[in-house]
Image: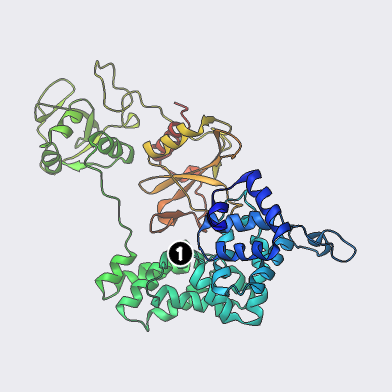
C-alpha cells in the first residue's frame, strides 16, 4: 500500500505517531507525502496535511522557543504553516495546488489544525495582495468557493476589490453569483455605483443590478429607487426581478393551508371557496372548523361548512352575496364561541392568545432560557416552517426565522456544540420586506427590529405562538 493511501486511513493518535515516525526517519519522504496529499484536492487530505505538520518538531528561533509568541498577533499555528510552505517550495509544489489548500482552511472543521491555519492564511494573502493584487485576486476567484477572502483585498485596495466583485456579479459567467452578492452585502458603497450604472445598462444587465440592489433594500435611498425607478422600467423582466413574490400556498397540505389563512387573516371570495372546496381533502377540513364574514352592519357572523354549503351556527342556510369575503375564524375575531363538540384538524377554538407585555419594546425575553433537546428542536424547525438566518460572521448568533405575512419573528438560539440541548434567547420582530433573500439563504442584513406596539395583534400573537411551538412551550 502506498503511503498516501495508508495515511488517509489513519486518524487520532495513530496519525500522530505515523507522522512523527516518518519525519524522523525520512524527512524528504515526509515532505513529498505532504505535497502528494495536497495535490489530491480533497478536504480530508488537506486536514491530514495540517495534522501531520502539527507533529513536526520545530527548532527554537532566537531567544524565544515559541515562534508564535515571538511576534505580536501571530497565531500559534504560524510556525507549522510556514514549515508547510517551505516543504511545498522544496518539493516543487505549484501555487495552484497549495493555494487550494490554504483557501480551504476557512471551511475546515473548526476543531481541526487546518482551521487554525486560517489566520496565517489571511496574513499570507494580505502580503501577496500588497505585492501583486491581481495574483491574490486570481487565486481567490478560482479557489475560494464563497469569495470570503475578498475582505482582505478590500482592506488592501477597497475600490479595486469592489469593482472586481461588481464585474463578476453583473457580467461573470459560470460562477456562483449568489456568493458574490453575499460578499457585496457588506459594502454599502456599491449602491451608488449600481444606481449610476442602471441607466446606462441593457435590460439583461439591469436585472443583475436589481438583484444586487435588493440586498440593500433596507437602505431608504435604495428602496425609493426600487419603488420609483425600477417599478416603472420598460422591461417586464426588470420589473419582475424587483417584485416581491408571495409564496404560493401548499395545496398538498389542506390543514396547513387553512391554518395559514386564519393566522394571516386572509379571506377568500365565495367563488374562490366554492372552487377550492371541490377538493374532498379541503372539504374534510372545512367541515370541522369555523368561518366568519362581516354583515352590512359591520357585525361578525359565524359560519360553518356542511354538505357543500355555508351555514350559520344555528344550522340555518347562509345566502351570501357573490362578492362576500369569508374568513377562517381566529379566536381574536370573536369574543366567545361557546361550547362545540368537534375534533378540529388544527388548534382553532382553543388557540392560545399572546399580547404585548409591559416593558417589551423592540424585543421580548418571555421565552428566554426555555430549553429543548437538539433533535426535537430541529424537527420543530422543519415542522413549523423555521429557517436559520445566514450568518455574516461566526460572532453572529444562531437565529431562527419564521415569516407570517408582512412580519417575521427572529429567535436567537443558544446551540453549544458540547450539549445536546438548545435554549431560547432574545426574540425580535422584523418587516418581511426588510429581509434579504439570495437564493435559498435569508439574511437580516441591516434590517432594524420593529417596535412590538406597531405589530398587528393577531400577527404578534401568532408569531409568539410559533416561537412557543418551536421550543415545545405549548
Q: Is residue 116 in view from this perspective?
A: no
Q: Which residue is mark 1?
A: 179
Image coordinates for residue 16, horizontal then vertical, percent: 67, 49
Q: Residue furthest bottom?
A: 200
- Where residue 353 appears, as percent x and y from the top left, is 41, 29
Residue at the image point whose x is 9% and y is 30% from the top: 308
- 266 or 133: which is nearer to us? 133
Q: Nearer the viewer, residue 369 or 394?
A: 394
Q: Nearer the viewer, residue 420 or 52?
A: 52
Across and down, in percent, residue 420 comes to 55, 33
The residue at the point 37 percent across, 36 percent down is: 383
Looking at the rendered image, the quarter that the C terminus falls into is top left
- Does residue 118 show up? yes
Mark 1 neighbour density, 10 Å: few (under 14) some (14–19) many (20 or more): some
Instruction: Give the image location of residue 379, x and y in percent.
Output: 41, 35
| Secondary structure category for the residue under label 1 | helix
Q: Is the residue 203 above or below the residue 339 in the image?
A: below
Amino acid at each position: 500500500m502506498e503511503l498516501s493511501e495508508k495515511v488517509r486511513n489513519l486518524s487520532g493518535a495513530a496519525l500522530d505517531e505515523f507522522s512523527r515516525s516518518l519525519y524522523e526517519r525520512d524527512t524528504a519522504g515526509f515532505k513529498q507525502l505532504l505535497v502528494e496529499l495536497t495535490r489530491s484536492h480533497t478536504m480530508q487530505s488537506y486536514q491530514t496535511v495540517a495534522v501531520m505538520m502539527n507533529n513536526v518538531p520545530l527548532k527554537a528561533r532566537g531567544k524565544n522557543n515559541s515562534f508564535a509568541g515571538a511576534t505580536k498577533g501571530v497565531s500559534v499555528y504560524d510556525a507549522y504553516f510556514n514549515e508547510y510552505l517551505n516543504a511545498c517550495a522544496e518539493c516543487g509544489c505549484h501555487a495552484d495546488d497549495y493555494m487550494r489548500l490554504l483557501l480551504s482552511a476557512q471551511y475546515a472543521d473548526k476543531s481541526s489544525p487546518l482551521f487554525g491555519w486560517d489566520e496565517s492564511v489571511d496574513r499570507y494573502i494580505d502580503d501577496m495582495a500588497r505585492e501583486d493584487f491581481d495574483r491574490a485576486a486570481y487565486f481567490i476567484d478560482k479557489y475560494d468557493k464563497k469569495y470570503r477572502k475578498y475582505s482582505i483585498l478590500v482592506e488592501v485596495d477597497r475600490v479595486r476589490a469592489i469593482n472586481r466583485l461588481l464585474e463578476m456579479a453583473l457580467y461573470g459567467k459560470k460562477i456562483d453569483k449568489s456568493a458574490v452578492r453575499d460578499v457585496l452585502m457588506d459594502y454599502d458603497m456599491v449602491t451608488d455605483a449600481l444606481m449610476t450604472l442602471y441607466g446606462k445598462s441593457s435590460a439583461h444587465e439591469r436585472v443583475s443590478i436589481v438583484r444586487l440592489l435588493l440586498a440593500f433594500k433596507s437602505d431608504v435611498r435604495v428602496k425609493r429607487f426600487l419603488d420609483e425607478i425600477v417599478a416603472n422600467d420598460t422591461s417586464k423582466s426588470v420589473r419582475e426581478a424587483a417584485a416581491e413574490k408571495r409564496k404560493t400556498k401548499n395545496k398538498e397540505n389542506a390543514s396547513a393551508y387553512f391554518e395559514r389563512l386564519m393566522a394571516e387573516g386572509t379571506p377568500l371570495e365565495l367563488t374562490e371557496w366554492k372552487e377550492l372546496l371541490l377538493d374532498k381533502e379541503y372539504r374534510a377540513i372545512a367541515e370541522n372548523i369555523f368561518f366568519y364574514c362581516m354583515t352590512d352592519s359591520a357585525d361578525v357572523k359565524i359560519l360553518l361548512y356542511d354538505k357543500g354549503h355555508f351555514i350559520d351556527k344555528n344550522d340555518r342556510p347562509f345566502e351570501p352575496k357573490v362578492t362576500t369575503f369569508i374568513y377562517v375564524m381566529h379566536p381574536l375575531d370573536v369574543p366567545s364561541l361557546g361550547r362545540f363538540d368537534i375534533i378540529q384538524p388544527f388548534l382553532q377554538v382553543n388557540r392560545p392568545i399572546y399580547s404585548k407585555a409591559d416593558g417589551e419594546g423592540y424585543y421580548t425575553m418571555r421565552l428566554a432560557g426555555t430549553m429543548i433537546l437538539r433533535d426535537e428542536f430541529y424537527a420543530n424547525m422543519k415542522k413549523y416552517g423555521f429557517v436559520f438566518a445566514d450568518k455574516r460572521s461566526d460572532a453572529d448568533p444562531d437565529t431562527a426565522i419564521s415569516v407570517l405575512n408582512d412580519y417575521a419573528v427572529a429567535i436567537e438560539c443558544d446551540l453549544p456544540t458540547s450539549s445536546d440541548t438548545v435554549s431560547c434567547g432574545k426574540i425580535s420582530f422584523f418587516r418581511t420586506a426588510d429581509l434579504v433573500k439570495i437564493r435559498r439563504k435569508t439574511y437580516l442584513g441591516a434590517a432594524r427590529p420593529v417596535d412590538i406596539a406597531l405589530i398587528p395583534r393577531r400577527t404578534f400573537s401568532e408569531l409568539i405562538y410559533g416561537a412557543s411551538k418551536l421550543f415545545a412551550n405549548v
